[in-house]
Amino acid sequence: METIKTLCPYCGVGCGLEVLPDKNQGWKVRGDRNHPSSQGMVCVKGATVAESIRTERLLYPMMRDTLDGPFRRASWDEALDAIADRIQAIRCTTGPDGICVYGSGQFITEDYYVAQKLVKGCLGTNNFDANSRLCMSSAVSGYVQSFGADGPPCCYDDLELTDCAFIIGSNTAECHPIVFNRLAKYHKKNPHVKMIVVDPRRTPTAEAADLHLAIKPGTDIDLLNGIAYLLLQSESIDPKFIQESTVHFEEFVQVVNSYTPEFVASRCGISVGELETAAKYWQQSQRVLSLWSMGINQSSEGTAKVRSLINLHLMTGQIGKPGCGPFSLTGQPNAMGGREAGGLSNLLPGYRTVKNAQHRTQVEQFWGLKPGSISPTPGRTAWDMILGLETGEVEMLWIAATNPVVSMPDLERTKAALWRSPFTVYQEAYYPTETSAYAHILLPATQWSEKTGVMTNSERRVSLCIGFDTPLGEARDDWSIFAEVGRRLGFSEQFAFNNSGDVYQEFVQLTRGQPCDVTGLSHEYLRQEGPQQWPCRENEPKHSAKEAKRLYTDARFPTPDERARFSAYHSRGLAEPPDPNYPFVLTTGRVYGHWHTMTRTGRTDKINQLHPEPFLEIHPRDAANLKIKEGDLLEVRSRRGKGVFPAKVTKAIVPGTLFVPMHWGSLWAEGAEANAMTHAESCPDSKQPELKACAVQLVKV
Ligand code: SF4
């Protein structure tokens, strides 16, 4: 076996890995020093990925008639025929909108693309959504509404070129460790560089900051408007940029004018001095780089939060230049590729939308389908699929590479709806997971190391992940399973792919002329030249893989008048604020070692030793009031569900707020599921649920 270059399959940082032969376990991994994003660094998840790959795998298709019956082994033909027959029956009776597919940011771009072609093109329903809906959809809608197109404008080199890192709603040190390593090293070496962290928790990220603003949950917009107010007062703005490259500045100023420091400090639970220091760091910095993640996105006003942050960059002209700009950190390894391939229920490939008639026509023609094949109506989002199961409108749910029985909000309701599902297909590499208990058909999927395809990381860098291991059992690639069902439904021409390279070759053609144009890429090119940032257009001079690319360097935006849009929002606050019956705000998040719902990391000894069990963080003042000691078992109750956790008494959390990690499902810690308590109130624009905050009460067990 030769050394193979690939990508870490965990988070959106997208670190490069090298796979080397190993005499004990066949192969091992190390960081790829030549990968431009990660420069050889990896965190514990990337370093231990080999441990979990070949344990507790789903090896062959299994079927059962009812959810309370036993599974029996089935052949691929039997399982695929049953799926195709059920799809056909639903299409012929109630129509295709009874069919839903729920995918994953773990997909390679090829998986996403083939699923879009099958569901949105051939079946004629837009009911494809992905777990990115729970992760990044507010960033998508914020970028689209402010700039006219999705796509983070920055690159990782900006981490080492900034004067001030403004980190809001992101525990970067634990959730995007290699991004944080790069930033922290640079910050340490350059005393003039400031780091501001906005988070109700004193996380390891906040520990490294020059200024930690421990705001009350849900007051981000107040804070952002408060900083804008002070920047206006001190005239720390870029009038030329505002005049030539933006619109709606006056409306924005009208709103911001009411955010006096005293008002903002009292809303956010910080001092006027802290707010003024944050504004001073912005004023003194030529280049402010804002980093954000779930703390902003997972909110019932997620889009408004994203746009309020972008406002600060527009008013200071800090975008499209080295070291500055608004930069969303993607959760999943290929959530970015999913967006490019149209992998949300309102999108089509190449940053097109289902509502746009011209976009639908372009895609229908490209796919060789009749005019009108693609529905103009956005499909069901992740939570809408659960609601559709409740009402009976969803007659078939096909879940792939994700574990909604842990990651969805309001878990009791989610589980009850899934239990009612007439027909659920679950395509997954591992068995069991919490979701496999709710499936009628289980399909074994290949995973990282066994399949070849493309992923895009947070800085728009596209890498080829090369399959180097033999698939276990009868596992097949996700894209090939979707394609096989398409062929069984009579769409042989549309799914005549021999391999994932063919799929990618077709996909890139649909990006031609679009913001995410990758017509210059192919599997072969990526294999030879290494990772590339998009845009990467055909026949354009190729730039060096190490040369960073930013968007909007000419201060022109992909809107009809080429100007970015200011937004003007007052905060609506939390969807479920605390009250006398439910006096605490529960916030959820991640720990350094575990990944999402632990499907892989729960099977990795080293990581389980690092984080053996879930816990609940409570401030010493709240603990004293309730006579709670470290390690006491506490029952947390919301209006929807409850969980029991050992107490961790710490000043790392603000009084009145509690924290539990979101990773543990019933398979790993029965009765300690964070999402048993959360609710599904969502942002009206992005449809992303407010997984970050709900009102709870606390009882000592
Ligand atoms: Fe993998 Fe993310 Fe860790 Fe990099 S930072 S090694 S991509 S989990």
Image: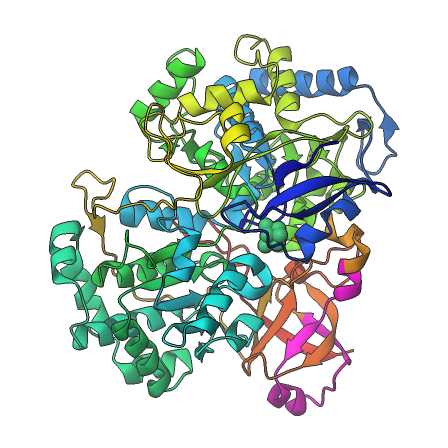
Q: Is residue 198 visible?
A: no
> Compared to 214, does 449 lie above or below?
above
Q: Position of residue 407 (x, y in %)?
A: 63, 51
Q: Position of residue 260 (x, y in %)?
A: 25, 80
In the picture, the quarter occupied by the N terminus is top right
Whether the magenta-drawn stretch holds residue 85 is answered as no
Residue shown at 64% from the left, 21% from the top: 480
Residue shown at 31% from the left, 58% from the top: 310
- Residues 584 and 431: in front is 431
Residue shown at 38% from the left, 46% from the top: 548
Q: Which residues are magenta?
A: 607-636
Res. 276 image quadrant: bottom left
Q: Position of residue 22 (x, y in %)?
A: 80, 41
Res. 26 image quadrant: top right
Residue shown at 56% from the left, 73% from the top: 203
In the picture, the quarter occupied by the C terminus is bottom right
Q: Is residue 147 visible?
A: yes
Whether the magenta-drawn stretch holds residue 622 is answered as yes
> Compared to 233, does 177 lie above or below?
above
